[in-house]
Image (tube, grey):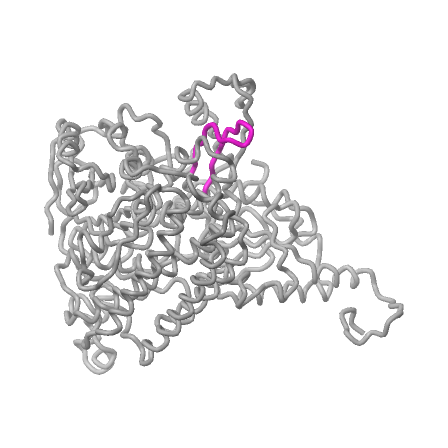
Amino acid sequence: MALNSQTLPIETAITTRLDEAIGWARESSLWPMIFGTACCAIEFMSVAASKYDISRFGAEVVRFSPRQADLLIVAGTVTYKQGPILKQIYDQMSEPKWVVSMGVCACSGGFYDNYTTMQGIDQIIPVDLYVGGCPPRPEALLDALLSLQKDLRTNKYNSQRHKDFKGELDNA
Amino acid sequence: MLENIIVSSAEIHSFIKDKYMDGFNYLLDITAIDYTEYAHVQEQDFALVYVIRHESFKEHIVIKTYLDDLITDSISYLFKGANWLEREVYDQYGIIFNHHPNLRRVLNHKEFIGHPLRKSYPITKGQFLREVDDLIDEMNNRLLSKDVVCKLDSGDFSECNKDLMFLNLGPSHPASHGTIRTYVALDGETIEAAVSEIGYLHRGFEKSCENHTYNQIVPYTDRLNYCSAISNNIAFVKTVEDMLGVTLSERAQAIRVMLLELSRIEDHIVCLAAVLVDMGGLTNYWYMYNPREDIYDLLSKLTGARLTNSFMRVGGMANDLYDGFELDLKEVIKKIQYGVEQTLSLIKHNRIFHDRTQNVGVISAEDAISYAMTGPNLRASGVTFDMRKDTPYYGYEKYEFDVIVGSVGDVYDRVMVRFGEIDESIKIMEQVMQNLPEGEVNIKDASITLPSKEAVYSTIEGAMNQFKLTYEGVKVPAGEYYGSIEATNGELGFFIVSDGSGTPYKVKVKAPSFTAMSAYPEMIEGSQLADAILTLGSLNIIAGEMDR
């Protein structure tokens, strides 16, 4: 029986694995931090507004302090000038943490293949989910959120997954 | 096409001064041109270009000077707005301005080597930044100008003759739009001195233009002011059409006017929703954002995209209005009016709103002009400059609407001017819909617009025409031209240099947010920290357009 089942009688004791209980808790309490820089941040405004309403999925406690957040959503173009700031914010978040790269600019630089745009944020920080689109529709970001939650629920979370990651700004 | 005035580099400074005395006191833009790869050999490798508007706002001049060596005198003592514009030219082209108060990079980062808009700089050569600029020396100069003396101890302020606290506002904070950094020295909660750093969203628009055809640039223009993509599309293609010397059909002009006004509303809504959230009024955000979603739905139906529409083409637009557009628009207008009405009912007579906004973040009309502020920000200071009235295009003179102006130039005026402009834009849209002319939306010229799909699939001429136009681009006659329209944030201009091919040789954007931002540090000095956030919100700085 799943932990979030509505049909549990009162005064029930459940035996479960600790992993599963933690996964269930994590799934329903993601606190996003928006690193919004450009057009995608405007689409994030739509995600937060009443029509799409991210709070339906238990992730509406948007925090703009990295120390209070566990889901970093990088929404928009990241330039080389912005790089050290993004890295600092990522480093300030405590584990466990996840990174969603929203929009093609954050994923790969998009159509800004030039001297100033970083060709994907994964050059400096590890990314868990990439959302394509320029900008992606709100549904696409919600889909990314749901798929992350599904991973958390099914215990796919692996704290060692980025162990070997080494970005351009590491050991700078 | 208007010819540039060419002045020798020895005389340029006195020439601009004379013109200034004649009333050309509104500096629109300064840029440079690197002629090293130009098809026709020019006098010198580099030229400097000044675009200045007359105080009557009815005309502008483009002054060009060929530089013998890459040094010239700064004009920042004449125009406050020249400060950042000259920094940008220095940053992008490496031209030195003598007597400039603070000649340092503005868009690229401090560890950047080279000058990216020079033709010799490879477009894809990126350079990582290791450490963010601490802005200490810039702040120190700023403090010295206010008679505050601080000791510098291992690269940081230690003892000052005033009890100051130093604080970074941004860049990573929603109230600073994610991309604007302001470093402030606080005396209690009062801002003693402020310096702003921009360029965090400098994504190389102008360099990218140099290897794309004119129609390929349209999607890039979407992402300048991404809150009102269509108005950027129009500003760009209109400039190109002016260079080609073509006139659109009346229907196309009317549709453009309507979409311009719709995007003006779209943009103002985001600005107003955000500034009210910055003030703590979250409810207004829902009231204002719901009609914006309705505008998105309408634009998705028309253009296929919510935000970045890419709807305009050189010589017309992607397609005509769909059947039933008029009814949909009427519905959207009703919802906009409802949202505005609801929001105003919460703030119009609200004491907290008045206290937070009135006489806060004031900029006088003289300063606003000297900084070349434009659009609603300038009108809030009481200057009646609106290109739709002063230099009408697309038949704006036919429509009846008012120019909304403020009197003080504070946050309140900037907010209320935007509310007023939403009403005026609705008036214009209704007038357009009442008399929407019939006809084609694209001009019939095989060298500019694509042939019909039927012709492409059934005739060799059509197929070749499509191929040549797509592959080589619209060939624009060689020349240099500055064109602009009244976009949502004010005068949005494009200075385009063409060498006769299908790709522009150089594109420079005259961005309203750039000049508005250069005024910001001075505006917030002496005010409270919390007011600085509101002031920034009310200026509606869109980073995509400011940093390009």
How many badges with numbers are in the image? 0
Q: Position of residue B349 (x, y in %)?
A: 47, 53
Is residue A24 shown left or right of residue B162? right
Is residue B226 shown left or right of residue A140? left
The residue segment tinted magenta is B180-197
Q: Position of residue B416 (x, y in %)?
A: 38, 52
Q: Position of residue B504 (x, y in %)?
A: 23, 52
Magenta stretch containing residue B185, yes or no? Answer: yes
Q: Nearer the viewer, residue B227 or B364?
A: B364
Residue A11 sits above or below residue B408 on the image: below
Q: Residue at position x 24%, y 48% from top? A: B385
Q: Nearer the viewer, residue A13 or A17?
A: A13
What secondary structure characterizes most of the magenta part?
Answer: strand
Q: Position of residue B45 (x, y in %)?
A: 19, 37
Magenta stretch containing residue A131, yes or no? Answer: no
Residue B111 in sight in this render: no
